[in-house]
């Protein structure tokens, strides 16, 4: 069973070192799919979760209203 948790954040936009991008949008952390070929599984070490990758999803809730 997947563990879903709401997490407060001040910003959905994050600086990145991805080529050709300065920023990325990260509305959540984790994944409910458990793909065997997952490239993002290493992200678990930044989450403080005990659950295996694929068993948790942190949904980011902004403390600021979005501006368009």
Image (cartoon, grey):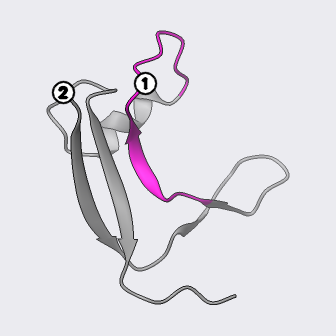
Q: For the C terminus, give its image quadrant.
A: bottom right
Residue 50 in percent (x, y) is at 14, 33
Q: SS class of the residue under badge 2?
A: loop
Specify which label sits upstream in the sequence, 1 or 2. Answer: 2
- Quarter of the image for residue 48 reads top left
Q: Which mark is residue 33?
A: 1
Image vertical order of residue 26 relative to residue 61, above or below: above
Q: Is residue 32 depicted above or below 21 in this figure? A: above
The residue positioned farthest toward the left in the image shown:
50
**Horizontal placement of 68 versus 8: left or right?**
right
Q: Give the image location of residue 23, x and y in percent.
A: 69, 64
Q: Which residues are magenta?
A: 25-39
Along the line of sight, the residue nearer the viewer: 6 or 42 = 6
Residue ID for mark 2: 1
Residue drawn at 74 percent across, 63 percent down: 22
In this rendering, is residue 11 above or below 31? below
Magenta part mainly helix, strand or loop? loop
């Amino acid at each position: 069973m997947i563990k879903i948790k709401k997490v407060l954040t001040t910003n959905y936009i994050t600086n990145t070192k991805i080529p050709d991008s300065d920023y990325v949008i990260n509305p959540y952390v984790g994944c409910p799919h458990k793909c065997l070929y997952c490239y993002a599984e290493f992200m678990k070490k930044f989450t403080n979760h005990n659950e295996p990758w694929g068993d948790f999803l942190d949904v980011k809730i902004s403390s600021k209203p979005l501006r368009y």
